[in-house]
Image: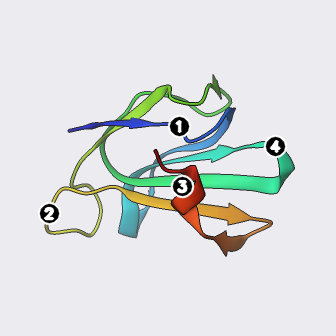
Amino acid sequence: GTPVKAAENGVVIYAGDGLKEFGNTVLVRHENGLVTVYGHASSIEVQRGQKVKRGQEIALSGMSGTTDSPKLHFEVRKNSAPVDPSTYLE
């Protein structure tokens, strides 16, 4: 898969396949209440509790979970509410 990189500096709060729909998923908590979600990875390159830097490879995109084509589910939440992710994409 294609390398998936952290959108901002933060700490991995989840890395696993327990979120059935998204398959292999990484959640990163950032300052100011933001959490980024990266789903459908073919492999996960980080573990819970690990500090990550913006641009650091955290996973490889793939087809895990419920999907019929390779993709990345990317989501940004602030205090559990969805936020427009476009400002975090390069």
Task: Say the numbered circle drawn on residue 6.
Answer: 1
Q: Position of residue 54 (x, y in %)?
A: 59, 30
Q: Earlier in the sequence, mark 4 or mark 2?
A: 4
Amino acid type of the residue that numbered disc 1 sits on in the rendered structure: Ala
Q: Nearer the viewer, mark 3 or mark 4?
A: 4
The crowding category of the residue bearing disc 4, from other C-alpha atoms within 10 Å (few below 14, some 14 to 19, many at least 20), is few
Q: Earlier in the sequence, mark 3 or mark 4?
A: 4
Relative placement, left or right, of 66 versus 38 is left
Task: Say the numbered circle drawn on residue 69.
Answer: 2
Q: Which residue is mark 3?
A: 37
Q: Earlier in the sequence, mark 2 or mark 1?
A: 1
Q: Earlier in the sequence, mark 3 or mark 2?
A: 3
Q: Earlier in the sequence, mark 4 or mark 1?
A: 1
Amino acid type of the residue that numbered disc 2 sits on in the rendered structure: Ser
Amino acid type of the residue that numbered disc 4 sits on in the rendered structure: Glu
Q: Nearer the viewer, mark 4 or mark 2?
A: 4
SS at mark 4 in the image: helix
Q: Which residue is mark 4?
A: 31
Relative placement, left or right, of 70 versus 24 is left
The crowding category of the residue bearing disc 2, from other C-alpha atoms within 10 Å (few below 14, some 14 to 19, many at least 20), is few
The crowding category of the residue bearing disc 1, from other C-alpha atoms within 10 Å (few below 14, some 14 to 19, many at least 20), is many
Instruction: Tell which of 19 and 31 is nearer to you.
Output: 31
Residue drawn at (67%, 32%) of the image = 9
